[in-house]
Amino acid sequence: MSKKVSIIIAHDKKRGSEIVDRCVQSVKKSVMFCGLEGETEIIVTEEPGKTKSRNDAVRNSKGEFLVFVDDDAVVTDGWLHELLKPLKNTSVGAAGGPSVLMPNAPFREVIADRILTSSIATWKSSSRYLAKGETRITDESELHSCNLAVRKTVFDLVNGFPDIVPCEENALLNNIQKLGVKLVYTNLAVVHHNRPPLFGSYARKMFYYGTGRGKMIRRYGFRAGRPRFVNPTVKSTVFFFAGLALHYVSYLSGLVWGLMRG
């Protein structure tokens, strides 16, 4: 029996079952909120490698719309409703929203979040981490795979996620845009997510992202947004700029490495 929506949760077994169970429960609650219980399937992937496991899950899915979320995210009640709303327009191929910081996060995650949500560090991509503006036509720089909906026919036309880790969703979205269909950012489709805490975990994550972007530059390039500062205090300002320096060193090192290894 066909379904309207296939929700695919990329699960990393190293995180344990408690994390993914929390995500699944929040997804089920959002499905109930928008009245799609009988039209939705939830698929939890358990294969190593997000790109392959997501593509395999799609091949086994029955939904008209594909929704991707990570196992360590917690979605809001209205998330699914808001994420699917732009896809009612047949000219839209994919839609996504922000992944905002978990409530009551530790201090080092809060400072990491302030860096990620600042256009000084992440340019236009800061909208991935903070609900900004209104629903709008966008490009790959504002969307990511932990909070993304794609029309199944469009996903199939571009042959799914390319193997460009960790920028597989950016490459997917670029390929979708080349079809002449639209990408939409909606600030109302919100999921909650942790941040890699300063300093070591954050540096490793930014190096990882930079590596992927280095590969992407060879194909698509990237665009910068306007700078935006965030609520300064003495302690947070010191950590913010220390973290910002770490952000650029780690990211640019990864970018160069990605360009070299491509």
Image (tube, grey):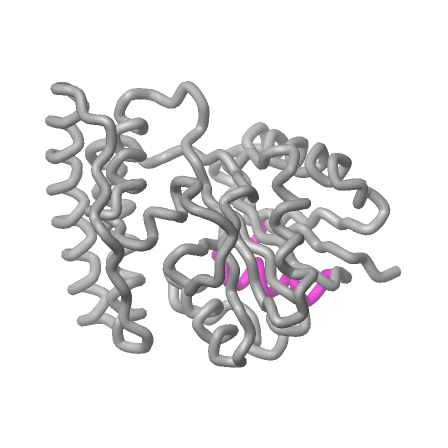
Q: Is residue 213 above or below residue 130?
A: below
User: How far from the left and from the top, in percent, is residue 142?
Assistant: 40, 55
- Residue at horizontal 74%, vertical 63%? 64
In the image, taking residue 41 as reference, residue 91 lies left or right, namely: left
Looking at the picture, tell me which residue is in the foreground, 177 or 13.
177
Say whether residue 48 is magenta: yes
**Residue 196 image offset from top left, x and y in percent:** 32, 36
The quadrant in which residue 221 appears is: bottom left
Q: Nearer the viewer, residue 83 or 41?
A: 83
Give yes or no for residue 89 being in the magenta stretch.
no
Side (left or right) of 40 relative to 213: right
Residue 160 in picture, x, y percent from top left: 56, 70
State which region is magenta. 46-61
Q: Nearer the viewer, residue 100 or 72?
A: 100
- Residue at the extreme front of the image, as rendered: 134
Q: Main secondary structure of the magenta part?
A: helix
Q: Residue at x 88, y 60 (%)?
A: 1
Q: Where's residue 220, x and y in %?
A: 32, 74
Please name the residue shown 41% across and 32% down the image.
101
Q: Quadrant of the C terminus?
A: bottom left
Which residue shows up at 18% across the image and 25% down it? 232
- Find residue 61 and report its image quarter: bottom right
Q: Position of 5 compared to 143: left or right?
A: right
